[in-house]
Image (cartoon, rainbow, N blue to C red):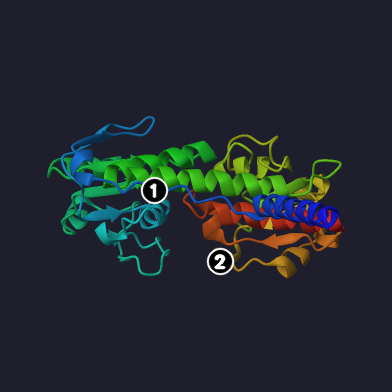
Amino acid sequence: MTGFRRLAALMMAAFALFTMITACATRQPSPVPVVPDDPASAFPAKVSLPGGQPVTLLQQPKRIVSLSPSATETLYALGAGDQVVAVDQASNFPANAPRTELSSFNADAAAVAGKDPDLVIAPDNATQLAEGLKTVDVPVLLTPSAASLDDAYQQIQVIGQATGHGNQAGALVQKMRTEIADIVAATPKPPQPMTYFHEVSPDLYTATSRSFVGNVYSLFGMVNIADSAPGPFPQLSQEHVVQANPNLIFAADTKCCGVNAPAIAARPGWQSIDAVRRNHVVELDDDLAGRWGPRVVELVRAISEAAGKAQQG
């Protein structure tokens, strides 16, 4: 009887140990807690981005005008959407953003000031607008085009600080870093680096590795067929693309210009390209490919899926 009890006790102990190990293996990591921001203590604040003038904000802005689609997406992702009173005509995400006819390319100070903003976020080429708004004491945060993921993360952090959402910005950046790292790590690595062509427009303007989107592709070790051309956004010839024979073609002009895989396959001479022959022409969302806000994670996922399929045949 004693031997039976000892055997039963050993079996129960082993089962308990197995249960503990299984639980540890399957337990999901707890989300990082976000400490609520305290705007009262965060202001006055001085924020700046590389190459830009510092912007001083005496209190949390309650009426924000965004003239940058990337900034608009960031504001809403940070929980600052209820502070946004107007966005430019190109800011089409999220759908409930208050779109107007304003544009960073031609908006004048009077039109923007008419929205009664206490903060304007605009691209860094809107210097004339910023000078005009300076005369009526409206602070303007100019945001340069991001050239890398680190640039995008920095802009999210600064926009968070400028709007009273610094803690949310830190949590969002950490979440993006983790998700992107997980996606890249889970993507199968090919024996040889795959080559790709990223199409910005049907007249074969493209993006090299020196651009933001090129920096994203580099996470996967891909070789850009345009990197021998000067600048971040050169125009290639038909001959260059055909001779380079990329393994993958990414069309980032589907919404603007109606380009799709059949249209690319119908181009003279392109039927011989490896990406066309193997049906590895990827139709991207133009907005995801052209912005550096929080949705860049979706772009990374799209590239990962395309890379995985290309390796399967």
Q: Residues within 10 Å of mark 1 (few under 14, many from 20)?
A: few
Q: Considering only order in the chain, which callout, 2 or 1, is on the residue closer to the N terminus?
A: 1
Residue at (25%, 57%) from the top-left corner?
83
Residue under pointer 1: 34
Dot 2: what SS? helix
Residue under pointer 2: 255
Q: Residues within 10 Å of mark 2 (few under 14, many from 20)?
A: some
147 relative position to 240: left or right: left
Residue at (48%, 37%) from the top-left corner?
151
* Quadrant position of residue 93: bottom left
Q: What is the x, y in percent for residue 276?
A: 81, 60
Q: What is the x, y in percent for residue 65?
A: 27, 55
**Quadrant where the C terminus lies?**
bottom right
Dot 1: what SS? loop
Above or below residue 267? Residue 105 is above
Residue 284 in view in this figure: yes
44 relative position to 237: left or right: left
Q: Nearer the viewer, mark 1 or mark 2?
A: 1
What amino acid type is highlighted by mark number 1? Answer: Val
Residue at (23%, 39%) from the top-left corner?
42
* Quadrant position of residue 49: top left
33 relative position to 58: left or right: right
Q: What is the x, y in percent for residue 226?
A: 69, 41
* Foreground pick, 189 / 230: 189
Above or below residue 154? Residue 109 is below
Residue at (20%, 54%) from the top-left corner?
62
Residue at mark 1 to residue at mark 2: CA–CA distance: 36 Å
